[in-house]
Image (spheres, rainbow, N blue to C red):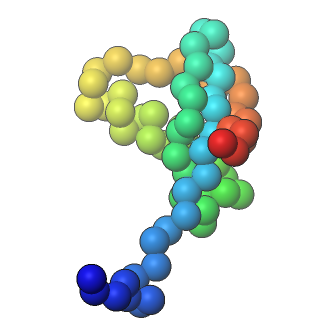
Amino acid sequence: MGRRSAGGRVEEFVLFDVLYEDGSRASNRKVPGSELGGAKTYIEALDRQIAEISGRPRSPIKSVTRAPRR
């Protein structure tokens, strides 16, 4: 078996639960560790990208909470 390279560091992700104003919920949304300060902004940007591709806009975000660790 080969050794694993120490040079290629894997970016850490943090999971968030998102509650939308229409009452829908998205669990375990991944946010890079480097974006923790603006997690809501990051998720809103992803939602806009998904809405552009799918043609179905998402309801505004009501709250973002960090998902419990498993």
Question: From this viewpoint, is residue 13 visible?
Answer: yes
Above or below — where is 21 with respect to 29? above
Residue found at x 65% / y 15%: 21
Taking 2 as reference, is 46 left or right?
right
**Where is residue 58 shown, x and y percent of the image?**
47, 21
Answer with the quarter of the image where residue 28 lies.
top right
Q: Between residues 40 and 3, which one lies in front from this camera angle? A: 3
**Where is residue 34 shown, x and y percent of the image?**
60, 66
**Where is residue 3 shown, x and y percent of the image?**
34, 88
Taking 24 as reference, is 37 left or right?
right
**Where is residue 27 shown, x and y percent of the image?**
57, 29
Q: Residue furthest front?
A: 1
Answer with the quarter of the image where residue 25 lies.
top right
Above or below — where is 17 with respect to 60? below
Above or below — where is 22 with respect to 58? above
Number of numbered markers: 0
Q: Quadrant of the N terminus?
A: bottom left
Above or below — where is 41 with respect to 23? below
Residue found at x 60% / y 9%: 22
Q: Quadrant of the C terminus?
A: top right
Taking 35 as reference, is 66 left or right?
right
Question: From this viewpoint, is residue 42 visible?
Answer: no
